[in-house]
């Protein structure tokens, strides 16, 4: 068994690891390869790629993601070995909070590694057309003057410094600005399209925009305001499960202010 960094030369072979129901892992892995804060690893056995995973390192937190084992190599403890290898990277960066989103299939592995459950993510699918929405003057296109406010808001809500991730997608953002103060933002080009807001009015108005084109919204179960809104507007709860887990020190995040997550890999 050998662990090595994933490179672009591995991308075609990684297609064999693609799990059913997941977004394209090649797109995500290409992003990891090209991002200095991401550390994608492959594990090689019997002259092939048997599994993969990635550690995503911010300044005070880390995420583990895309931990996948090829079906031919399951039930050998390989998933746990990948997790421990990634945790070694986290430790070398002196990070004391490691997070991940677990599927039902993967949760037992992470529990054995010491991760604890924090909350659940609710997966909601649109079954009926979303109602037409009125134009809201407070919602504007991205303006650089609000960059600092946006990053500060994200840091306050998530208790993480995600600037390395967000920076490459800000130009597409929609902002809810009231009397010169940013109240919320939506970034449609970043994975699932995160919506974060410090007020329910801003969060729901931005969520309405997302819902006109999105068939699915995933958000923390703690945001009961958004779950109730979606339920009343043509969305139903999916049987898909996602569990937010932590190893080490938990962080003082505000899940009730997250109206749509980025994705399973970034929270």
Image (spheres, grey):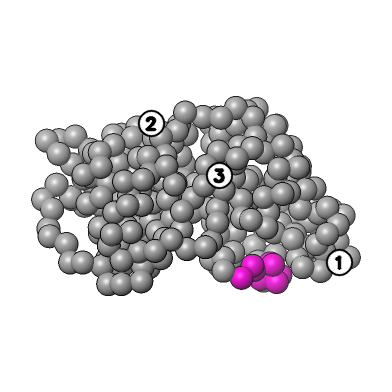
* Mark 2 burial class by Cα count in 10 Å: few <14, some 14-19, many 20+: some
Specify start and end residues of the magenta stretch as a single range. Answer: 13-20
Is residue 258 on the magenta stretch? Answer: no
Circle on res. 244: 3
Q: Nearer the viewer, residue 219 or 93?
A: 219
Q: Residue at x 86, y 61 (%)?
A: 45
Distance in Å between CA atoms under marks 2 and 1: 46 Å
**Residue 94: percent from left, percent from top:** 65, 27
* Mark 2 and mark 1 residues within 8 Å of each other at the beta carbon: no
- Tell me the CA gap for discs 3 and 2: 18 Å
The residue lying at 14 percent from left, 39 percent from top is 178
Residue at position x 28%, y 59% in the image: 232
Q: Looking at the rendering, in which quadrant would you find the N terminus? A: bottom right
Q: Within 10 angstroms of label 3, few (less than 14), some, or many (20 or more) residues? A: many
Q: What residue is shown at x 12% (from left), y 58% (from top)?
A: 135
Q: Which residue is mark 2?
A: 156
Image marks 3 and 1: residues in contact by CB distance under 8 Å: no
Q: Which mark is residue 47?
A: 1
Indicate left or right for 84 with 215 as reference: right
């Amino acid at each position: 068994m050998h662990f090595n960094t994933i490179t672009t030369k591995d991308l075609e072979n990684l297609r064999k690891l693609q799990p059913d129901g997941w977004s394209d892992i090649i797109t995500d892995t290409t992003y990891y390869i090209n991002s200095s804060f991401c550390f994608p690893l492959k594990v090689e056995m019997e002259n092939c790629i048997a599994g993969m995973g990635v550690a995503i390192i911010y300044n005070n937190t880390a995420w583990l993601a895309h931990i996948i084992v090829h079906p031919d190599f399951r039930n050998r403890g390989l998933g746990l070995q990948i997790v421990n290898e990634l945790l070694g990277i986290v430790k070398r960066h002196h990070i004391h909070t490691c997070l991940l989103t677990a599927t039902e299939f993967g949760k037992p592995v992470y529990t054995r590694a010491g991760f604890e459950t924090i909350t659940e993510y609710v997966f909601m699918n649109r079954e009926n057309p979303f109602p037409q929405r009125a134009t809201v003057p407070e919602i504007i296109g991205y303006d650089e003057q609000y960059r600092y406010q946006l990053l500060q808001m994200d840091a306050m809500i998530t208790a993480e410094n995600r600037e390395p991730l967000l920076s490459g997608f800000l130009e597409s953002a929609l902002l809810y600005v009231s009397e010169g103060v940013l109240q919320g933002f939506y970034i449609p080009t970043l994975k699932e399209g995160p919506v974060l807001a410090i007020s329910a009015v801003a969060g729901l108005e931005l969520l309405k925009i997302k819902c006109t084109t999105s068939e699915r919204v995933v958000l923390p179960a703690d945001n009961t305001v958004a779950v109730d809104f979606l339920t009343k507007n043509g969305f139903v709860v999916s049987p898909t499960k996602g569990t937010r887990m932590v190893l080490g020190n938990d962080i003082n995040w505000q899940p009730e202010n997250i109206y749509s997550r980025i994705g399973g890999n970034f929270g």
